[in-house]
Amino acid sequence: MRKIYFSLLLIFAASSSLAQNCPLTDKPDINFLDENGDGIDGDTNNAVFVSDLTGNDANPGTKSAPLKSLTMAMAKANAVSKDIYMAAGTYTIYAPLIMFDGIGFYGYFSSTTWNRNKFNKVIIQGTSNVIYAKGNTKNSTLQGLEIIASNPTGPGSSSYAVWVDSCTGTFLFIDNIIRAGKGNAGANGANGVGGAAGGNGGNGTSGMCNGNTAGAGGAAGFSSCAPGGKGGNGGVYTQNGFSGSANSAGTPGGGGGLSGDPGKAGNNGSNGTNGSSGVSASSNNVIHEITASGVKGGKGFDGTDGSNGISGCGGGGGGGQHCTLCNDGSGNGGGGGGGAGCKGFGGKGGNGGGSSIAFFVRDSRVYLENNKVFTQTAGDGGGGGNGGKGGDGGVGGSGAVNCISEVGAGGNGGDGGNGGDAGAGSGGNGGSSIGVMAIGSADVYHSGNTFTLGASGMGGVGGTANNLPSGALGYNGVAKNIEGNSTNAVASVQGELCVEDLTIVRYKNSMRSGLITVTLSEPNPKEVRVNYSFTNGTAVDGSDFVLTPGQLSFLPYNTVQSFPFQVTADMGDTTKRQFTINLSNATGGSVIGRGASTITIWPYAGASINSALSNVSVSHYPNPVSSSATILVKGINSDALTINVYNQISQLVAVLHTESAGDEKEFTLNATDFNEGVYVYEVIAEGQTIAKKKMVLMPH
């Protein structure tokens, strides 16, 4: 006895069988076609089902027992490498959905029947960035969804409904509604700090008409950036007065007065000079500021600082008195130089406004088809900061003037210069309202999309400055459907074409038609064409079969096609014969994977079967069936034997074929993916149906 296992495959003509050399792909499509006959648009064996209305996160995620939350569905889908089928409902998320590699999201499903139509609205909402993918290497499709991004929090923050970054796999967004949130206004630039004022220089102290205590020079005026020069001390008796100290620029202080009768006055210290003013900032002509964390309006430039003032020089000390017939005296001290005023600091540029972006695509390949894209109002740019005023310079100290008829007066200290005023910052640029923003090496293809855009943000006003022009106004953001590298054309997605083997049994007295199936591993937005031809083997064109070479066309998103041929009547031929099918010249971006298949033609053997039908028995157990069944066929000596299994609506859902010798064969049916109900299976030998049976499948 030989035991044979089988799996699901496509519908085909009774008493011919495919060998299932090609993986079957039935991705949900916008035409809602059921290409594999499992009762839904899509593949029940390659999906995790989720329903916000009828699901439960304790369920296994099957069609009959869906999950409830997207979080659980994504974890399950990633674990088993399956797509996610979403029933109508609203799915609220609290963090961006991080796309797993190769996992697709498909909406439009009913929560009860899992049929698809556009009235079944699937909404994903809850964060300012809903879909996030980075570094994915496999293709993923999002279809039949409404993605709603919320408004962000924080000044200058942007909203992105979809973010795709550094992905080498293609992301396909088909027939969705995409809504970005608003962009927030940018923060104002900080005002510049005013410069510190310089301190006044100290007054010199008095000298003596008669005595050796000279006047002291006045203290230097304090300054945090440029202190003044100290006043010079007076001379004693025969001493000249001492010079005042230099200022912050190194200019010498006032010279001391000469000694004599009377002593001479010290020289005044030089005044310091004012610091130079800064410059108010111009506008930033880079509209967008693009960083690792996203896009917003360009930041305004900062105003430049003023420069520090130059301090005052110290005044020179007065000369001492010396004489022959009098009492000698000591000179007066010079005044200290005033401290310089310090520079004002520039106002900071205003921050850019946040943007409203539906698709942010960086260094990735994305295809957009038939999407409705909405953005909202972008944020205004922040105002530029005001420039800081320079600090006032200190006043120079006075030189002492005691007893100047005998001793020298002290020179006055120089005044400190004022600090320079600073420039104001320019306003930040307004955020932009953009449907698709493609940056870096992004490659975006698009076809049939519509865009409804919000207003762009206004540029922020520039700050003001003391005795200077104001900072420049920031630029307004832009409102554009698409910005960056894009192509208005249908994209191609590479898939592999595969042609199936086929076994077919001749009719006795007439020609018989057959279909040869070709599958495409990935749905392609472009039409795919491939040529087919044949090579004679033991079966020869014209005598054993008739096939005209031609070309197959896969319409967009179609993954299964077939072409016909005919098998000639038996006419007494008792030999199994074979020929080869060849695929060539694929177009539309797809490639040929399995490009050759074997077609086997079995002879008609109806007479021998008819004479032995009374000895045939067909049975299965258990009955009813839970998750698997064994079908036993006894009493027929035929190498070629086929079992076709049909569901409640007469769709062929499973096929088994064997070419093994022996009169007893056992088949095992794995029914774990079947729905409960009544099924019919038929046993076919060499072109004839020899038995039909019913099978009841219980819930499992």
Image (cartoon, rainbow, N blue to C red):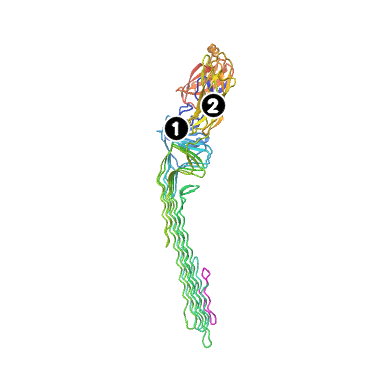
The image shows residue 350, relative to residue 392, as above or below, that is above
Cα–Cα gap, marks 2 and 1? 28 Å
The amino acid type found where label 2 is placed reads Tyr
* Numbered disc 1: secondary structure: loop
Asked if residue 540 can be seen in this view, the reply is: yes
Task: Residue 122: give x, y in percent of width and height.
Answer: 42, 36
Query: Badge 2: few (under 14), some or many (20 or more) residues near its Cα, within 10 Å?
Result: many
The image shows residue 655, relative to residue 493, as above or below, that is above
Question: Which of the two marks, 2 or 1, is nearer to us in this view?
Answer: 2
The amino acid type found where label 1 is placed reads Ile
Residue matched to label 1: 30
User: Which region is colored magenta?
Assistant: 231-251
Residue matched to label 2: 532
* Numbered disc 2: secondary structure: strand
Q: Are marks 2 and 1 in contact (CB under 8 Å)?
A: no
Q: Quadrant of residue 536?
A: top right
The image shows residue 396, relative to residue 671, as above or below, that is below
* Residue 246 lies in the magenta-colored region: yes
Task: Residue 489: give x, y in percent of width and height.
Answer: 47, 37
> Where the N terminus falls, by quadrant?
top right
Task: Residue 363: give x, y in percent of width and height.
Answer: 52, 43
